[in-house]
Image (cartoon, rainbow, N blue to C red):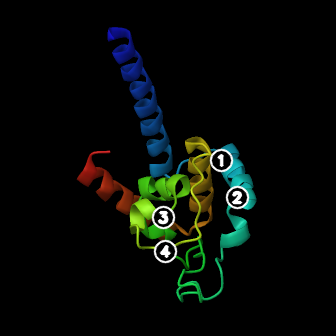
Amino acid sequence: MFSIGVLIFGVMAVYLTRYASIHSDVLQGAGSAAAVARGKMDYEQYCASCHGKQLQGQPDWKSPLPNGRLPAPPHDATGHTWHHADDVLIGIIQNGLKPYAGDDYESDMPAFSGVLSIDESRDILIYLKSIWPQREREFQNEVTQRQKGRFGS
C-alpha cells in the first residue's frame, strides 16, 4: 500500500512540475522559433479547418448557426481568444468547451486530449501569441497573471 502511495505521489509531482514549466513558458509568450513552428504545424493540422488558416475564424462567428451552435471564432486579434488566460485556453484545447461554458452550451469544438499532448497544446498557444499584436499579448498576459493570483496556479 505504501509503495502505491509513493508511486501516486511521484506521478503527481512529475505532472505538476511539468505543468508549472508549461505555464511559465506560455505565460511569458516565450517560445523558441521551434515551438512557434511546431505550434503552427499543429494549428494547421488540427485547428485551421474550423478556425481558418489565417486564424480568421468562420464567417459571422458571433451569430448562431441554424443548429444553435456558434461558428468557430477567429484566433487573431479580431477574436476573443486573447481575452482568456493560458490555463483556460490550454484547457479548451484539451477538454473542449463544456468544462468552461457549461453543459447547456453546445459547441462543435472537440476535445483534443487524446490527440494533442499538453506540450503540443502549449505550442499552439505560443504560435497564436506570436501572431497577436503587442497590445493583445500584453492584455492576455495580464489576464493570465490575474488568474494565477486568484487561483494560485
Residue placed under numbered mark 1 in the picture: 115
Residue 33 % position (x, y) = 68, 47
Amino acid at circle 3: Leu
Amino acid at circle 4: His
* Neighbour tally class for label 1: few under 14, some 14-19, many 20 plus, Cα within 10 Å: few
Q: Secondary structure at mark 4?
A: loop
Tell which of 57 and 99 is nearer to you.
99
Quick one: label 1 or label 3, which is nearer the N terminus?
Answer: 3
Residue 80, numbered circle: 4
Do callouts 1 and 3 mark residues in contact (Cβ within 8 Å)? no
Residue 63 % position (x, y) = 54, 89
Please identify the quarter of the rendering in which residue 130 is found.
bottom right
Q: Is residue 47 above or below residue 35?
A: below
| Residue beneath the point at 55% across and 79% down | 78
Amino acid at circle 1: Val
Q: CA distance from mark 1 to mark 2?
A: 9 Å
Q: CA distance from mark 1 to mark 3?
A: 16 Å
